[in-house]
Amino acid sequence: MKLSLGLLIGQAAGGHPAAWLHPKANAAGSTDIAYFRSLVQLAEKGCFDLFFIADTPAARTDNLHAWSRFPMFMNVLEPVTLLTGLAGATTHIGLGGTVSTSFSEPYNVARQFASLDHISGGRAAWNVVTSANDYAARNFGHATLPPHALRYERAGEFVDVVNELWDSWDDDAFIHDRASGLFFDPRKQHAVHHQGKFFKVDGALNIARSPQGHPVIIQAGASDTGLELAARTAEVVFASASNPQDAKRGYDELKGRMAKYGRDPDTMKILAGLPVVIGSSQQEAEDRAQALQEMIHPDVGRFRLGTDLETDLSDLPLDEPIPPERLPKSANQHKAFFDGIMKIIREENPTLRQLYLRYERGRKTIKGTPQRIADVMEEWFAMGAADGFMMQFATLPDGLDDFVRLVVPELQRRGLFRTAYTGTTLREHLGLARPANRRAA
């Protein structure tokens, strides 16, 4: 068995909060389709399973003094449109994107991703999110996000309806029989009659069943509610544990939840988030990472922490710890990030400056030579802490180029990663079976 590789694109210039300031990054790439084509083609050259676009349906509209220095999601292409534009520039790599269940309708999402699956020849994947910021909520008529549990309850019903819609037709329903005059066999449509707590859908998808049957379902929720939804519905899960021991426990625990839903653990791939900075020596990698950290403006440092702590830190001095009374008791948005910051505060009581220079959203960056990066990946994979990795690069395109040129050949030399694609669909790359139509006669 080989490990799986995805490429996470959050910001076009790279994953570091100061990436756009780096002279090797493409600061203006976020709406440049030619730039994205070059990225996805480079990832396909490296035999990646998946090219993945993160997204939120909102620009930030306050604290612009900070967002103007850290332009996360402030100028981005809509992901399904972008991925459709990339489908014709590639032949094998999977194309995954984020669409929120909180601010969409099941029919639209089912149709969008079925269309992408047809256009790409079976390479589409939908990342199921419930959204985690009130900027998005306000764009859709809500003052704030609904409570966490309610968002996930809606997401569960949403995914169920989408799966039903993807099974609107048998695989052989569209027969195009000129002799009989039948374009499709009427017996092979399976209209959806759904009435639930959140959605009422009475109809069928107006597109043939897609090449993968169902586009691949991705999920990344780290809360207990999110993990339960993943155990029931997800085929790829992004994990964010910071060490292999915790990752192994999380891996076993999540796959252990699947039996109650009648699922085999092999029907899910868990990809560990892996931000890396590569250097020709350990020192060079450390220096590259440190240079980026020093580019973080104090306004951005305070603001990133405040966003994930769900509190305003803008008035606090940089060289003192955050006063305990300014810290919320719990999170309503990104629970995993909140818990990670609170752990550092409890154990080390750093100053605010020390905390923002230390804080990394999600996995801690691995810095080192190509051999060191491959060692880390091999350790995690060999001990069953991950089925593969969702790669994140501090700056793009140079970080991806270094990885494809230097790390991928090392993984291939060790027999850990493919040297060529052997299938054409994302399911084939991931070793996931094509689902049968559960609504067929």
Image (cartoon, rainbow, N blue to C red):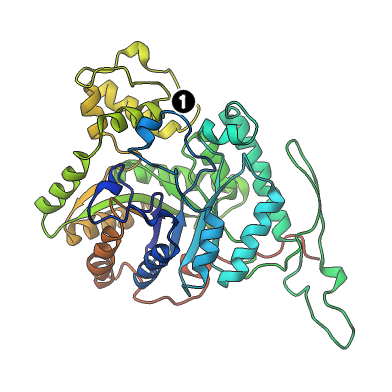
Q: Mark 1 = which residue?
A: 331
Q: Residue furthest top?
A: 325
- Up/down of 285 relative to 70, above or below: below
Q: How many marks?
A: 1
Residue at the (65%, 45%) spot, across then down: 104
The front one of 404 and 347 is: 404
Amino acid type of disc 1? Ala
Quarter of image, res 182: bottom right
The front one of 7 and 197 is: 7
Give left or right: position of 198 versus 148: right
Quarter of image, res 213: bottom right
- Up/down of 34 relative to 148, above or below: below
Residue 388 screen position, x and y as percent: 38, 57
Q: Residues within 10 Å of mark 1 (few under 14, many from 20)?
A: some
Residue 398 screen position, x and y as percent: 26, 60
The front one of 107 and 134 is: 134
Residue at the (60%, 36%) spot, across then down: 139
Q: Residue furthest right?
A: 180
Name the quarter where the C terminus is drawn: bottom right
Query: Can see residue 103?
Result: yes
Q: Residue furthest bottom?
A: 179
Query: Can see residue 125?
Result: no
- Up/down of 117 relative to 229, above or below: below
Residue 23 screen position, x and y as percent: 22, 53
Give left or right: position of 81 versus 207: left
Name the quarter where the N terminus is drawn: bottom left
Residue 222 screen position, x and y as percent: 46, 38
For mark 1, give the secondary structure.
Answer: loop
